[in-house]
Image (spheres, coloured by chain):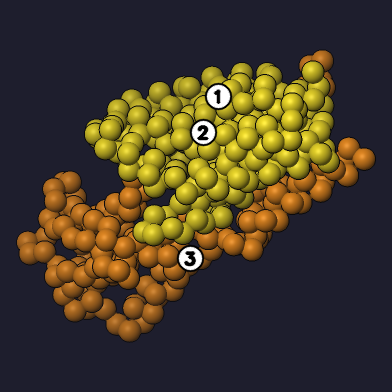
Amino acid sequence: MKIKHTIIFAVILTMIPASVAFAHKVIIFAWVEDGYIHTESSFGSKRKAKNSPITVFNEKGLIVHKGITDQEGKYSFKIPEKIDSDLVLKLDAGTAHQARWRIPENELVTVHSAKDTQAAIMEKEKLEERPSIFKIITGIGIIFGLALAVKFLKRKTS
Amino acid sequence: MHISEGILSGPVLASGAVVAMAGTAIGLKKIDYDHIVHVAILASAFFVASLIHVNIGPASTHLILNGIVGLLLGFAAIPAILTALLLQSIFFQYGGLTALGVNVVVMAVPAVLVHYLFLPLLGKSSSLNFTAGFLAGLFSILFSSLLLGMALWFTDENFFEISLVIISAHIPVMIIEGIITGFCVTFLLKVYPEIIPVRKK
């Protein structure tokens, strides 16, 4: 009876969130096109990081540009002049939520093909993927595995 | 509530890691052999709770459930929350791995506090059970918000302003977590009272 109740409680607690799986990771994604750097920022799962400051640094950590995302979480700006290093874009999406994206120096001058853009979009979609059921179940499996290990160790020591 | 990589200074990260390790050691020592499965269940609940998103205005918040975890586990909540946060960081990219210690302190210390504050209220009457659960859920988020504000303050921020922003952003979560914790406690006392430590006494 005790085990039955435990299982029921576990199922209730773990199944409730499965229907409303929204991510809370912070993502900034950037790409270069026609002399501009375009960015899209989100909390994953298509939730956009609105009105969030974006700061652009060069390799030395000096600020070379600043901006704020729009209602769609987007922000575009012209590639700053006289850049001779990679650029790091930092998104501040609210208290304690921050993300970074690095654009290598060679990408700033290369002319990008449609294939490159397609690859970039696929990368962005991968970043925005919701946590899969597989990951959730694996995580719960690991927790119970660790609990069993603790139980085994406690039994051994006693 | 999860602090990302690159936000906090080295000393704050190191202090958080030390406190988290000490708390985990105490928690592991205090886990009752017969209740290890409860720890695993509540760690699992905490692990998936962050996927429930509360969308109010521009704020992006999610459920945490450290109140019920702490209320039912006491010090054992620390290793439970550490494990869940580590897995959240690896699988969902919530919070940075270097900030894991501080994230554990921010969420697990309030969990232990509400255990000692509100557990004595349980088992006296059904309305008091709900109230104790509600307050445990509410105060765990409030204390976590304050600790998060402190972590940022020690790094380089204005504590008062930051704390106000964090607390106001989490008010909906405080109320929702309070209601969920209240109902869970009331439900558990009816169908599975063994999981509530107070029933052992």
Relative to B52, is A141 above or below? above
- The CA span between labels 1 and 2 is 9 Å
> How many C-alpha atoms fall within 10 Å of the one at disc 2: few (<14), some, or many (≥20)?
many
Q: Earlier in the sequence, mark 1 or mark 2?
A: 1
Residues marked 1 and 2, same chain? yes
Relative to B152, is B168 above or below? below
Q: Provide residue A152's location: percent of width, then percent of height.
A: 80, 28
Chain that is orange in the image = A
Relative to A100, is A79 above or below? below
Colour representing chain B: yellow
* Depth order, front residue of B138/B83: B138
**Quick check: can you spot residue B88?**
no
> How many C-alpha atoms fall within 10 Å of the one at disc 1: few (<14), some, or many (≥20)?
many
Q: Chain of mark 1?
A: B
- The CA span between labels 2 and 3 is 30 Å
Quadrant that contains the C terminus of chain A: top right
> Which label sits in the foreground, 1 or 2?
2
Residue B117 as seen in the image, left or right of residue A54: right
| Residue A45's disc number | 3
The residue at which mark 2 appears reads as B139
